[in-house]
Amino acid sequence: MRVTRLDIRNLRGFSEVQLFPGPALNFFSGDNGAGKTSVLEALHLMAYGRSFRGRVRDGLVRNGEAALEVFLEWNENRPGPSALVDASDLQVAASERKAGLRHSGQDWSGRLDGENVTQLGELCAALAVITFEPGSHALITGPSELRRRFLDWGLFHVERDFFSTWRRYSRALKQRNALLKARVPQPQLDAWDAELVHAGEPLSRYRQVYLDALQPHFVELMREMAPALGESRLDYVPGWRRDEMPFADALLLARDRDLQAGFTSVGPHRADWRIDFGSIPGRDALSRGQAKLTALSALLSQAEHFAADTGQQPIIAFDDLASELDRGHQQRVLSRLIESGAQVFITGTEIPAVLAQSGADFAMFHVEQGVISTGTGNIDNVLGDAPWQR
Ligand SMILES: Nc1ncnc2c1ncn2[C@@H]1O[C@H](COP(=O)(O)OP(=O)(O)OP(=O)(O)O)[C@@H](O)[C@H]1O
């Protein structure tokens, strides 16, 4: 996937900007508070329906304005019709896509390829962005909800039936919790237990299989990014003692306790994944920098798996690369990304030395007081009339 145009209106400090990113590396420079991160937030918002810096109503909309708007055009490879049966012979055709999102904090509306969308999820499913930002270490050291979300985001993109299973599970859980809170007689719970099991068992299997598929990518990335941590392994934690009993039994066993507590205490909504590091006892022993490198390895393994599974590179967004990673790691990440051919958006107060010295072509933008202007990278850039768009 390659973004060819990005319009932002009324997002944080931006009143109205339009830019035409380059096909590979894009670097956004600017002083503190200039609005560099806001550019990445616009991409992230379209791909996740929320910002990585909190909810839309927490200040994403420019002060005094009713709503923000983001408009994107991008190219992607799509398998075209082919008379050949062998999947490896599928013809791949580039297709142009566009999406728009308007968000007021309360309401949103969206368009995808010229049609209104009824669910924000349709935009999220269309565009894949993987973001690494100063808060990303929380993926490893923060609450389990972030790690579940990480798995579910990946599955949402690579597993067609995942979303309906996830939704079915979420609805059943909500119903069961409402009944538990109302302390209904036990037999009334039976139907919802069955529904929860019906969706929960496959949900758990999807996640397990997905985590297993990330494993080789993650192990290799960790060897490169943090060899001192030893040989690492990802382990799925299902949310009940799955190796001892089926989910249905775990629910039944927990019923009295759940009625007391007024919520469901076991199940995939309590799942997690953990990392076994070869040479440290666990994530609590990680330095902050090591937690960042581990999170980065997880995110890049997700990007690599996505590319292998879908035949498309996701878009990679890196907020403040130079201040997040030391030079050696910046170098490693950059060469990996250049090699992958992904489109990358990087921000920083100045061009990281490793980027300047990499010899790679990159497009450069300067952000200042709500305006984005053309800079000079190793290639000519890019407002309005990019060479690759002529
Ligand atoms: N709701 C809002 N309305 C108007 N301006 C806002 C709003 N929210 C944030 N801003 C301003 O928009 C800018 C957002 O900056 P952003 O965080 O994108 O900058 P940055 O270039 O990434 O900075 P840094 O290098 O400090 O991380 C800041 O100047 C901020 O004060």
Image (cartoon, rainbow, N blue to C red):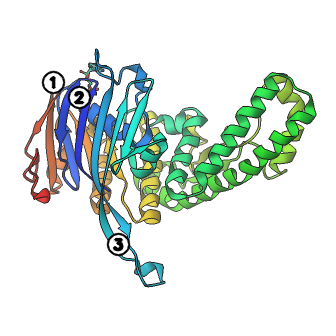
Q: Which mark is residue 369?
A: 1
Separation of residues labelled 3 and 2 (CA atoms): 37 Å
Dot 3 corresponds to which residue? 92
Of circles 3 and 2, the one toward us is: 3
Pinpoint residue 47: horizontal percent, then vertical percent.
40, 43
Mark 1 vs mark 3: which is more N-terminal?
3
* Residues under numbered marks 3 and 2 in contact, where contact means CB atoms less than 8 Å apart: no
Dot 2 corresponds to which residue? 35
Indicate the amino acid at tag 3.
Val
Separation of residues labelled 2 and 1 (CA atoms): 7 Å
Residue at the limit of the structure toward the top, as seen here: 64
Out of 112 and 226, give the one closest to the viewer. Answer: 112
| CA neighbours of label 2 inside 10 A, class few (<14), some (14 to 19), many (20+) | many
Quarter of the image holding residue 37? top left
Separation of residues labelled 1 and 3 (CA atoms): 42 Å
Pinpoint residue 61: horizontal percent, then vertical percent.
33, 23
